[in-house]
Image (spheres, grey):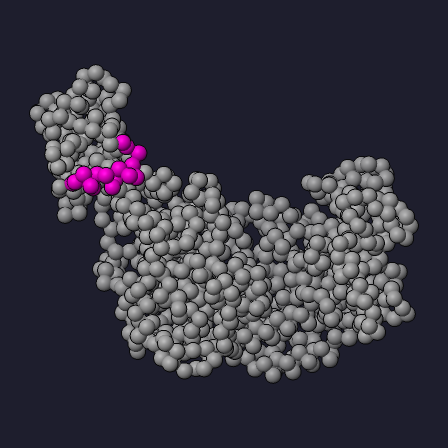
């Protein structure tokens, strides 16, 4: 289909609810809570890590507001009350209520359709695409409406994670439980034997929850072994000691409780006095030798000495024996110094790993690829190679490799099918916490996963998590399996949490499971061949260099492919796709210009794949007006028209002040209708009029922050501009989208008409009134007195007279200012004077030579457009050959 046909067909399209209004307040109040408790709101998304996941409630609301429109009929939908699986007529809501709600959505009241957010709504004969599916949130939420959906992603890890999410609704839970029980029976005790520690309360062993390690380097000056403690905290106190801190004595290594870790303390074992806050590592990656005072760069010392040595220094334990004996919690669960037995057990595991050659095939044997995240770059300063890491296995110690390979081998012994793949998913998520790149957060007494900074940051004090898991602790295989199982159970019968009067409510279980009518494809979305296929594209596209998914996903990929390499194409490569990824990557020389070009290619594919009246809805991470401009230009160049934007749960208070601020937005766009020429001056007035309407609607009817209103206004400005992209004239030139965005930023922040804007707006009317003038004046920088003095208007009784170039009083004012060579002569004064001389057939050459400027030409374009009079251009020597188009006649 040609783009012209596409444009003509789109004129008849029905406006979507999301284009008229969106319940930002309702979505954001859920999103805030969902973000803190994903495991309760939508457990399906906690089965495995994926980066920058958007809240499920957001995509549910987007889907509801995007796939229903004025053409939706009763037969196109089904509605059930969750838990009862019966139509809603008996509960006061019917299909007709839904149809009415669709048309009732507006900017001032977007909530009529929100009443159906918590209902089991099914939409027939609709199809969506997510070409950048990532963690698959859009597909999961769409599937709950019974919509046919397709997701595409280049990354095999994203593909596998999303595949298992969408298959979860049909997975046999009993088969999964049997498979886990078999693995547990086969290897749990074998693994746990390497994670025992002498209980400090008796002659028996306790379970290790975490082993605490510290890196050590020899001082380059005196040779003293320097432990790289930034401070000596281990963890906050618990239970009756919750006002104290567990710290490690730098002299004898005892873990002791102190009242204040920032003040001088004394070791209870050796009486050594020290300030726990004052360690050997200083800001900027330096250590100071406690023996001689030498200060040295840690990475420089590693370069000279080789990879830092590791010392086991403390243990967090749980003792089931003491628990069963009824001891206090602080006795059966706590922290202690690593004993000789603890160190000997690690050495035993190390020897076992080196002799168990049958297990080495179950760990990755590749080197870590150099890239923008693994090597020092503008993206990340955490160069893993400067810390002595070369292979993926260097991110683990020998005991972890022994335990992980033992576990993966047991999973490999499970027959092929869902159970094996969900076990692998749990194993892969366990890698998030079981490694020597994770740290312990003392203030919260918990381990922090490897991707705390979406990068690889080799810590000086890593923790070693128990890979199988004990009664307590997080991030171990047992805990991850529980999360996978909960995700599968949720996928079978999902619920919805929503908020009424500030209180969270949860629906009964929906009958519609997750994943129906969904498919996923591992591919470059630019290779998609579908045309006129999808009702909507709902997605969260990549954003510049926010996260280079290929590099961070490699961490999981190299383990997953051990079992999946012979099962799925895409898992047979050394690493995940790099060059093909649409993201800036300084290591590969991929620039912002490359990103814009490739995103343009993607938008062209999306436009082709959409039906004639289709919709593109996507989330976007914005940081400054330049990125707005690049986004708008890319959309417009690929024949999209922006129809709305909405903020997502962000702190936007800086926006109105004009500061650079990072936030997230939802953008709605449609394949464009035919664009029409317009002057910037006219477009600016149209934009400001639209802003006035929005401001009045939102301030009167919505409880929104000023920054949220600013984002909605920005969408309206984009909408006005994108109707004319490539045809917006200013000073004889065509404005670019980036230039327009820069101007729009100023308009939203100032929102004030200048004298010329006010005059042009009045001139466009055939019979302007004083009332019209007064309304415009209220948001103008001009004053009534000044405009009266300039003879730009006057009152003749009750008649309002606009002072144009041919008005005698206006002529007299302008001629006097010109004769005085007044510095107060405005561009509008000059235009009126030139028009007067032109009509009198007097020479304008001398004045044009002095005055001709882009501002003058731009104003004359605006005057010509407002009046439909081409003379304003002719007097400048400009003649528009497309005048009929230009004046929209």
Image height of 53 relative to 300, above or below? below
Image quadrant in which you'd find residue 828 = top left
Residue at 54 percent across and 54 percent down: it is 548
Q: Which percent across, then down, holds residue 738?
A: 37, 42
Q: Residue furthest top?
A: 820
Horizontally, is 179 left or right of 834 in the view? right
Residue at 76 percent across and 61 percent down: it is 239
Q: Which percent across, then down, holds residue 301?
A: 76, 42
Q: Residue furthest left?
A: 840
Image height of 173 relative to 281, above or below? below
Residue at 14 percent across and 36 percent down: it is 800
Whether the magenta-drawn stretch holds residue 210 is answered as no
Residue 724 visible here: yes
Image quadrant in which you'd find residue 338 = bottom right
Part of the protein shown in magenta: 768-783
Horizontally, is 339 left or right of 650 in the view? right
Q: How many marks?
A: 0
Q: Which percent across, then down, holds residue 605?
A: 37, 60
Q: Which percent across, then down, holds residue 843?
A: 12, 22
Horizontally, is 462 left or right of 846 in the view? right
Horizontally, is 372 left or right of 580 in the view? right
Q: Residue furthest front?
A: 797
Give 238 or 42, whichever is nearer the viewer.
238
The quadrant the N terminus occupies is bottom left
Residue at 38 percent across and 55 percent down: it is 702
Residue 521 visible here: no
């Amino acid at each position: 289909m040609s783009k012209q046909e596409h444009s003509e067909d789109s004129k008849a399209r029905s406006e979507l609810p999301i284009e008229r209004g969106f319940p930002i307040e309702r979505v954001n109040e859920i999103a805030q809570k969902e973000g803190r408790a994903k495991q309760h709101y939508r457990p399906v998304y906690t089965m495995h890590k994926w980066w920058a996941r958007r809240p499920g409630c957001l995509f549910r609301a987007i889907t509801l507001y995007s796939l229903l429109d004025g053409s939706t009929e009763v037969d196109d939908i089904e509605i059930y009350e969750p838990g009862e699986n019966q139509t809603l007529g008996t509960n006061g809501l019917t299909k007709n209520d839904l149809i009415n709600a669709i048309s009732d959505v507006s900017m001032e009241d977007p909530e009529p359709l929100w009443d159906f957010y918590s209902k089991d709504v099914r939409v027939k004969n609709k199809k969506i695409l997510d070409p950048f599916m990532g963690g698959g949130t859009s597909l999961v939420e769409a599937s709950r409406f019974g919509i046919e959906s397709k997701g595409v992603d280049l990354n095999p890890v994203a593909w596998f994670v999303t595949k298992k999410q969408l298959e979860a609704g049909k997975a046999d839970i009993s088969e999964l439980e049997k498979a886990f029980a078999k693995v547990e029976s086969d290897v749990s005790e074998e693994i746990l034997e390497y994670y025992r520690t002498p209980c400090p309360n008796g002659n028996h062993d306790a379970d290790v929850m975490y082993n605490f390690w510290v890196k050590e380097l020899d001082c380059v000056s005196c040779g003293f072994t320097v432990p790289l403690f930034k401070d000596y905290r281990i963890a906050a106190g618990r239970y009756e000691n919750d006002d104290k801190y567990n710290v490690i004595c730098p002299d004898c290594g005892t873990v002791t409780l102190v009242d204040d870790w920032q003040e001088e303390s004394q070791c209870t074992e050796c009486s050594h006095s020290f300030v726990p806050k004052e360690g050997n590592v200083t800001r900027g990656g330096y250590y100071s030798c406690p023996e001689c005072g030498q200060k040295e760069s840690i990475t420089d010392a590693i370069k000279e000495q080789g990879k830092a040595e590791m010392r086991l220094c403390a243990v967090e334990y749980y003792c089931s024996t003491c628990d069963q004996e009824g001891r206090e919690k602080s006795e059966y669960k706590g922290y202690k110094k690593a004993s000789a037995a603890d160190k000997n057990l690690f050495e035993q595991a190390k020897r076992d790993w080196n002799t168990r050659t049958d297990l080495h095939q179950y760990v990755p044997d590749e080197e870590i690829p150099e890239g923008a995240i693994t090597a020092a770059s503008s993206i990340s300063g955490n160069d893993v190679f400067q810390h002595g890491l070369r292979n993926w296995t260097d991110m683990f110690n020998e005991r972890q490799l022994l335990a992980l390979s033992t576990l993966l081998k047991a999973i490999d012994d499970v027959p092929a099918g869902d159970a094996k793949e969900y076990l692998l998913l749990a194993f892969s998520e366990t890698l998030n916490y079981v490694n020597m790149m994770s740290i312990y957060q003392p203030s919260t007494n918990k381990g922090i996963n490897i991707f705390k900074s979406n990068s690889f940051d080799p810590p000086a004090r890593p923790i070693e998590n128990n890979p199988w898991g004990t009664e307590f602790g997080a991030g171990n295989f047992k805990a991850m399996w529980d999360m996978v199982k909960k995700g599968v159970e949720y996928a079978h019968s999902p619920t919805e949490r929503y908020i009424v009067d500030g209180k969270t409510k949860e629906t009964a279980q929906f009958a519609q499971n997750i994943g129906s009518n969904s498919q996923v494809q591992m591919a470059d979305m630019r290779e998609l061949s579908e045309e006129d296929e999808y009702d909507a594209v709902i997605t969260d596209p990549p954003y510049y260099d926010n996260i280079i998914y290929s590099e961070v996903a490699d961490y999981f990929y190299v383990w997953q492919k051990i079992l999946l390499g012979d099962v799925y194409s895409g898992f047979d490569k050394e690493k995940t796709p790099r060059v093909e990824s649409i993201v800036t990557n300084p290591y590969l020389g991929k620039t912002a210009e490359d990103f814009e070009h490739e995103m343009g290619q993607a938008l062209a594919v999306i436009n082709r794949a959409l039906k004639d009246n289709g919709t593109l809805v996507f989330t976007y991470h914005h940081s400054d007006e330049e990125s707005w401009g690049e986004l708008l230009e890319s959309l417009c160049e690929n024949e999209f028209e922006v129809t709305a934007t909405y903020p997502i749960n962000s702190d936007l208070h800086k926006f109105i002040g004009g500061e650079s601020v990072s936030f997230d937005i939802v953008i709605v766009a449609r394949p464009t209708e035919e664009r029409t020429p317009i002057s910037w001056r006219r477009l600016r007035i149209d934009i400001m009029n639209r802003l006035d309407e929005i401001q009045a609607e939102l301030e009167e009817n919505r409880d929104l922050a000023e920054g949220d209103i600013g984002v909605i206004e920005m969408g309206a400005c984009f909408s006005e501009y994108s109707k004319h992209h490539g045809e917006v004239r200013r000073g004889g030139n065509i404005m670019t989208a980036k230039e327009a965005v820069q101007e729009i930023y100023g308009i939203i922040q100032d929102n004030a008409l200048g004298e010329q804007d006010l005059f042009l707006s009045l001139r466009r009317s055939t019979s302007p009134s004083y009332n019209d003038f007064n309304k415009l004046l209220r948001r103008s920088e001009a004053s009534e007195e000044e405009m009266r003095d300039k003879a730009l208007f006057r009152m003749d009784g009750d008649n309002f007279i606009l002072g144009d170039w041919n008005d005698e009083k206006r002529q007299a004012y302008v001629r006097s200012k010109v004769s005085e060579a007044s510095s107060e002569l405005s561009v509008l004064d000059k235009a009126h004077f030139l028009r007067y001389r032109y009509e009198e057939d007097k020479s304008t050459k001398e004045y044009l030579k002095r005055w001709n400027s882009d501002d003058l030409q731009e104003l004359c374009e605006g005057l010509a457009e407002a009046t439909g009079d081409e003379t304003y251009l002719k007097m400048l020597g400009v003649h528009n050959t497309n005048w009929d188009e230009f004046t929209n006649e």
